[in-house]
Amino acid sequence: MDREQIKSFIIARAAGELKDGDIVNLGIGMPTMIPNFLPEDVRVTIQAENGLLGVIPCNDETRDAVYKVDAGATPVTVSTGGCYFDSCTSFGMIRGGHIDVTMLGALEVDEQGNISNWIIPGKRLPGMGGAMDLVIGAKRVIVTMEHTQKGAPKILKKCRLPLTALKCVDLIITEMGVIEVTENGLMLVEINPEFTVEQVQEATEAVLIISPDLKPMA
Amino acid sequence: MDREQIKSFIIARAAGELKDGDIVNLGIGMPTMIPNFLPEDVRVTIQAENGLLGVIPCNDETRDAVYKVDAGATPVTVSTGGCYFDSCTSFGMIRGGHIDVTMLGALEVDEQGNISNWIIPGKRLPGMGGAMDLVIGAKRVIVTMEHTQKGAPKILKKCRLPLTALKCVDLIITEMGVIEVTENGLMLVEINPEFTVEQVQEATEAVLIISPDLKPMA
Amino acid sequence: MTKFVSVKEAVAMIPDGATIMVGGFMGCGNPHKIIDELAKSGKGNFKIICNDGAQPGGPMGEENYGVAKLIHNHQVKHLVATHVGLNPEVGRQMNDGTLKVDLIPQGSFAEMIRAGGAGLGGVLTPTGVGTIIEDYEDYVHSVQEIDGKKYLLMKPIRADFALISGYKVDKLGNVWYKGSTSNFGLVMATAADKVIVEADNVVEVGEIEPENVRTPCIFVDYIVNGGG
Amino acid sequence: MTKFVSVKEAVAMIPDGATIMVGGFMGCGNPHKIIDELAKSGKGNFKIICNDGAQPGGPMGEENYGVAKLIHNHQVKHLVATHVGLNPEVGRQMNDGTLKVDLIPQGSFAEMIRAGGAGLGGVLTPTGVGTIIEDYEDYVHSVQEIDGKKYLLMKPIRADFALISGYKVDKLGNVWYKGSTSNFGLVMATAADKVIVEADNVVEVGEIEPENVRTPCIFVDYIVNGGG
């Protein structure tokens, strides 16, 4: 698989985690593309942390577009029945547990479900934006990312980069498999048939528990 | 003066404390009547803590009246340019120092500017409502009340009833005079010409400092 | 997903002994039809979290107005409020020992409910410092001094149910409040496990401008059509 | 009382070195005409409190968009924000040591400004617990454990000026925000000594329904007519 295929594969699988009626917040990058992969009978409501509910793409190229952007600064609009609100209301919604699922990328995840995704000291300091609130507030936190970074594992025994939050990740979806964060550690529950369990473990620093019910990832 | 005259006298004097443009919150009872005593060139905006700004009387006796009441549960409306909001917004306004003046009654006030106005243990327990927030939040707190309760002083050395708040009263207006709360204690700055300084002191438990610039109250 | 229910179905969901937030201020903004049905239900032992006990004598000649009905019927065993002076029945039942009443400053009350709905650990307010509120262990976590100023750390408040009233409610559950009725309903809708909105008017989706929705539909579990 | 001023008069009020809140998210909701004038003014050494550094390249072909202009001009010595990844110039000036940047989680940032405007002593949030945020002494008062759960007590934020943008502003200063532009402006309007609103459209008093006013006029000190 090339990078584009890897992305599509991860996104398609991630889309399968969403249920009809879910309120979801989708991080910049791969998660943003998930709506395109949803089956017709699964309708989700997309929240953007800068104050939108019911986000849909905008085809408007008039001046009007400047009044409505999503969290990635892309011009968008809301569906009929959607709404706009201020940032305090938005993060009250997020922190208060009113978002069903947040999907976002990560630099590192570890076997306790810790996540690092906002800073590489001395190199890149984009800021955490809403990520720290989203991962502690959403009912379910799903990380979508490539399994390794230039061959180096991103799923670690312990995160080395500054954390975004402690023990918050529920599920990790990569091109190699689907990994659940359990009390006993990381459990591989699905595997991409192109890889062996040994290959997945080799690309992972944390020790994987292999589900007795391991399924192929599709 | 009979009770009604006393009330009118206090209210008329209290009205003189308001400046054109002030945002004011008026407690139940005497303060509610202050707008009727304002000169034409003094226009104030009345806030009601249950979520109204620009309160004016309502002559509407239709069902519509049930949607708009002031803090005393009286049907009201707002002037053109007024607005409605929720209680958190309202008390953010109050606690955050966005109200210029609050005027309210009291059971007791003392020489430190402490006030008691929400409970008589074992007798009356109406509750504090918004009073505790108003007296600590408004920029200026003015107490309007009769000088004594059945002859007993209400302006004390130290409040005996449970407090509403500490050191918050700026000015006390009664039928006998106008008293400023200063760092050194209570200073009589105006006196009703019907009384002597001695009579006012006698009706007051706290020791009054007499302003070197004592004026007649009108 | 928001579901339409009849007022009977709504009340059927509420068990004896439930902790119930009720929006409104002195009856203004109470969900009157749900309360009427609850008053008829015979259920009781409720803990009611509401700004006040409303009042006997409503603006349209009601004998008891809003939550005053539930109190009058002795369906309430515990009332958490800010002011109960306009309903003498509250005082009577307190003296009888049949009704427990906790009084909280109104701004703190609103903010504690907001904290309950917004995942905050409490509210740091200067309100109540130096008063007997400091001793209300059920509501005050601690007295804290920050940069030389004292604050009370008030605890968050949540409930099993929030019963609120909306003037316009669209078919998805987006709510617009008329006049001064949003008061506590706005935050209560965020801080209860089940939120039931009584709609004075059910309107089509899209009829409330997206910027003017005050309670987004994701907070609303059930709509009772209270119109007509 | 709210006063109309020209954009030049508005900028003339802002001294070198002022602490300025700017509403908006990635430029959306920035008061663009005031910022343009501020960019031309030659003033600087500002502490800017804004969600982000906006971005080079605006939606209508602007070379630098919103607050990005002030950063590009080196008028900002200190930026308090939540995310600056979309404006590479911020990173460059940080590396040069000419711009100090403090990053705060976005939900905490919004709530800290709200606390600053609402007289609260701080914000107790679980966000940031166990991260390096705990060490941000300028913004974190303490780490507290409440009922077994950890929270950061974040300090309130206030500013000398808040510069915000409203789509409809009536002649008294009541504000209605379009689309997603209310974001931080709504709370910033409560938390600064002087609040200046840029009105995309000045409308007659009464044109915004009383229930739909989002920032009541008492928070607004000056209106700049940014329309036409």
Image (cartoon, coloured by chain):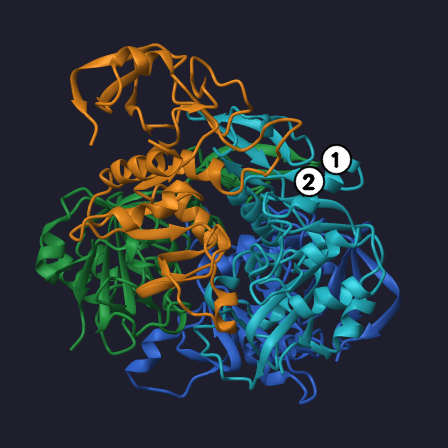
Chain colours: A blue, B orange, C cyan, D green
Residue underneath mark 1: C95
Image coordinates for residue A49, horizontal then vertical, percent: 50, 64
Dividing the picture into quadrants, the one containing residue B171 is: top left
Asked whether A90 or A123 is in front, the reply is A90
Asked whether B158 or D197 is in front, the reply is B158
Please report the residue visible at 24 percent of the width from the left and 77 percent of the height from the top.
D61
Dividing the picture into quadrants, the one containing residue A208 is: bottom right
User: Disc 2 marks which amino acid?
Assistant: Gly
Circle 2: element type = helix
Q: On the same chain: label 2 and label 1?
A: yes
Residue underneath mark 2: C91
Q: Is residue C183 above or below residue B171?
A: below
Please report the residue visible at 51 percent of the width from the left and 54 percent of the height from the top.
B73
- For the view shown, which residue lies furthest in the right direction? A212
Q: Is residue B105 above or below residue C66?
A: above
Task: Determine if residue D227 is in view.
Answer: yes
Please report the residue visible at 30 percent of the width from the left and 86 percent of the height from the top.
A62
User: Alpha carbon of mark 2 to alpha carbon of mark 1: how far?
Assistant: 6 Å
Circle 1: element type = helix
Number of marks drawn: 2
Dividing the picture into quadrants, the one containing residue A192 is: bottom right
Left or right of residue A137: residue C176: left
